[in-house]
Image (spheres, rainbow, N blue to C red):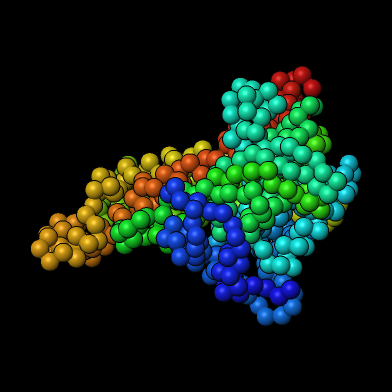
């Protein structure tokens, strides 16, 4: 099949999917205000990548076969919409899992590769559904009062399986085509039914998606970042969904129940680090601009904070470069980023992100959250006073400084800013998971050898 156009993407959303927002079922997804921006972004992504012809060759289906391929993919990924990014990362995660399972379960690996081709041929967009409701965190999945709080197989049929559960925090699920379901963690012996990985169309019977969104409801001119870039967050309900065997990638093999989460974590953390390197530079730019607008750019503690932010942005980018430079090939010739450098870089970027935001807030001051709205600037009676008193020095008008404050508030301190603070920390798994993986792949024997040599105990 040829690549989809933007118009064809819009038409593909009219497939009977069951979407909910603000307590009501959404009858027309493309016209609903909560989804308008997200759909426009994905539609633009289709339009930007569209090429006529019979072969789908979008860059989001590229498989890195060298370190240069990996670097090129990350360079272009920063300019894609979130759904296209998750499609690329999710499918590469599946291929990573296929490579790691091939010796034990070659039929699952083949199904994954066939599914990759299905998505490529039909130019589909995918999201990964991994985090379960989890119930009481103290109790194992099979011992929960409600066994459905971890997604599980409830029926095995000759032609497939039926699954039940919920997946939380699934960004852009409502505006995608496919849900790639994965176990949320490593399952133990006796928890076979919870070791389920599969792919499900968003409009499959039994799938219901409840949505929240950090998009501004009004005054879009005061929200320059979030009004232009927002995605719905899906609470995905899987109410006895049938999955045919060809879409099942794991069905009870607990030894590989964590393979999918680890594979997805690698690619999500790499992509997250790439985005956070860009965010780091943006925060530096905001801090420098507001310091200049306030007339404080030469004050020593302001300069020190911005210098610290420059070091942060540079080290995040350096970690990203190290992850690419130390990428390794699989037996299939696919290149995967370094586990050690990817996890170390993502951990540092996430752990220090809120500290960098604090610097921006400290440099900017209280007007970040109290500056009058753009409509106030335009009011005939009070507008001239707002412009007069928000101005600071020649070349810095009241309008300019006010709009700069709105950008900082929207990006770091409002609904979108709060979403950023949480997702920077949690995307790709929390900090503890990244510490575990970094330690696992660190050359501890070499480190101990150096210490023993120093101590004269070799």
Question: Residue 110 occupies which quadrant of the picture?
Answer: bottom right
The residue depicted at 32 percent of the width and 42 percent of the height is 362
Q: Name the outermost residue toward the bottom.
A: 52
User: Does 273 appear above or below 383?
Assistant: above
Residue 125 appears in the picture as rendered: yes
Work out whether residue 348 or residue 27 is closer to the camera in this orientation and state it.
27
Q: Name the outermost residue toward the left.
A: 381
User: Does 450 appear above or below 78?
Assistant: above
Question: Residue 305 occupies which quadrant of the picture?
Answer: top left
Q: Position of residue 328 (x, y in %)?
A: 77, 50
How many numbered callouts?
0
Q: Is residue 80 left or right of residue 21?
A: right
Q: Position of residue 33 (x, y in %)?
A: 42, 60
Work out whether residue 321 or residue 427 is closer to the camera in this orientation and state it.
427
Q: Position of residue 127 (x, y in %)?
A: 63, 53
Q: Position of residue 217 (x, y in %)?
A: 35, 56
Quarter holding the N terminus? bottom right
The residue depicted at 51 percent of the width and 44 percent of the height is 423
Residue 393 appears in the picture as rendered: no
Quarter holding the C terminus? top right
The residue depicted at 36 percent of the width and 47 percent of the height is 414
């Amino acid at each position: 099949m040829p690549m989809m156009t933007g118009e064809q993407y819009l038409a593909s959303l009219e497939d009977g999917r069951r979407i909910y927002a603000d307590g009501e079922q959404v009858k027309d997804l493309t016209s609903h205000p909560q989804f308008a921006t997200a759909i426009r972004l994905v539609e633009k992504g289709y339009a930007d990548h569209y090429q006529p012809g019979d072969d789908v060759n979008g860059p989001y289906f590229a498989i890195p076969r060298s370190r240069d391929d990996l670097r090129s993919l990350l360079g272009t990924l920063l300019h894609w919409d979130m759904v296209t990014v998750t499609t690329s990362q999710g499918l590469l995660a599946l291929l990573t899992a296929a490579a790691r399972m091939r010796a034990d379960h070659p039929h699952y690996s083949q199904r994954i590769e066939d599914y990759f081709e299905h998505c490529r041929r039909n130019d589909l967009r995918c999201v990964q559904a991994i985090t379960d409701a989890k119930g009481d965190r103290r109790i194992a999945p099979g011992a929960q009062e409600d066994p459905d709080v971890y997604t599980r197989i409830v029926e095995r049929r000759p032609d497939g399986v039926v699954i039940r559960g919920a997946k939380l925090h699934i960004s852009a699920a409502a505006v995608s085509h496919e849900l790639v379901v994965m176990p949320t963690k490593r399952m133990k012996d006796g928890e076979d039914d919870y070791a389920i990985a599969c792919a499900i169309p968003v409009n499959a019977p039994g799938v219901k998606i409840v949505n929240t969104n950090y998009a501004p409801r009004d005054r879009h001119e005061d929200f320059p970042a979030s009004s232009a870039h927002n995605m719905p967050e899906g609470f995905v309900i899987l109410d006895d969904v049938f999955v045919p065997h060809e879409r099942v990638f794991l069905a009870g093999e607990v030894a590989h129940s964590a393979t999918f989460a680890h594979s997805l974590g690698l690619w999500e953390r790499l992509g997250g680090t790439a985005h956070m390197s860009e965010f780091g530079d943006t925060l530096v730019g905001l801090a420098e601009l507001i310091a200049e607008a306030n007339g404080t750019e030469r004050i020593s503690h302001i300069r020190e904070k911005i210098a610290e932010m420059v070091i942060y942005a540079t080290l995040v980018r350096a970690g990203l470069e190290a992850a690419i430079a130390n990428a390794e090939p699989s037996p299939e010739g696919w290149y995967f980023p370094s586990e050690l450098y990817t996890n170390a870089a993502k951990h540092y970027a996430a752990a220090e992100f809120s500290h960098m935001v604090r610097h921006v807030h400290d440099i900017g001051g209280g007007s970040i959250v109290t500056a009058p709205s753009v409509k106030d600037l335009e009011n005939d009676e009070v507008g001239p006073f707002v412009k007069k008193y928000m101005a600071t020095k020649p070349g810095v008008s009241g309008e300019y400084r006010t709009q700069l404050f709105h950008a900082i508030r929207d990006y770091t301190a409002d609904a979108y800013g709060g979403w950023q603070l949480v997702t920077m920390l949690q995307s790709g798994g929390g900090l503890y998971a990244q510490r575990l993986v970094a330690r696992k792949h660190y050359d501890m024997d070499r480190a101990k050898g150096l210490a023993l040599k120093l101590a004269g105990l070799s």
